[in-house]
Image (spheres, rainbow, N blue to C red):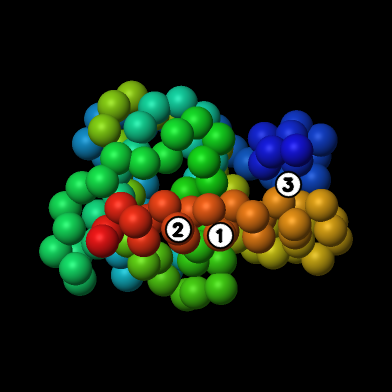
Amino acid sequence: MAVRDFISRGIVEGESETLERGNSIFRQGEDVHFFYLVTKGTVALADHTMGIDEQVVAPPDFLLGITDLLHDTYSFTAYTLEHTELIRIKKVAIQKALQENPMLRLYLLKMMSWEASLTKTAFE
């Protein structure tokens, strides 16, 4: 089961958003209020503390920012490399759903692990 399934079943609420090329989704150091499910398009991640400008990641159905679930601020900047369609999900909605749904908890732990390894590899 994917995050999109949890949204379609009403377990997690999300709001569609469309961004054109070069738009910022969030910036490193900003407060974490949302996570973004990338459904179409490509997103780049940048880590300004490490001086890395761009790594192409975020295939469709990638929950962008989930590694910062337990943090107050985003640990990297994310911006679009092309026309990108997203579903914006409130952090508090994810936290609430995690308490109520063990399958979502398991899925997000897997996703957090996958994203952490992907971004670590991308920034090495």
Task: Identify the residue position indicated by label 3 in the image.
Answer: 12
Tell me the quadrant of the picture where the C terminus can be found.
bottom left
Q: CA distance from mark 1 to mark 2?
A: 6 Å
Given contact means CB atoms under 8 Å apart, are the residues at marks 2 and 3 in contact?
no
The three-letter amino acid code for the residue at tag 3 is: Val
Of residues 79 and 16, which is closer to you in this image? 79
Q: Secondary structure at mark 2?
A: helix
Identify which residue is drawn at 45% across, 34% down: 59
Q: Dividing the picture into quarters, in which one does residue 41 lie?
A: top left
Q: CA distance from mark 2 to mark 3?
A: 25 Å
The three-letter amino acid code for the residue at tag 1 is: Ser
Q: CA distance from mark 1 to mark 3?
A: 20 Å
Tell me the quadrant of the picture where the N terminus can be found.
top right
Task: Identify the residue position indicated by label 1 in the image.
Answer: 113
The tag earlier along the polypeptide, 2 or 3, is: 3
Q: Secondary structure at mark 3?
A: loop
Above or below 78: residue 27: below
| Label 3 Cα neighbours within 10 Å, binned few <14 / some 14-19 / many ≥20 | many
Number of numbered discs: 3
The reply, left or right, for residue 53 in relation to residue 77 is left
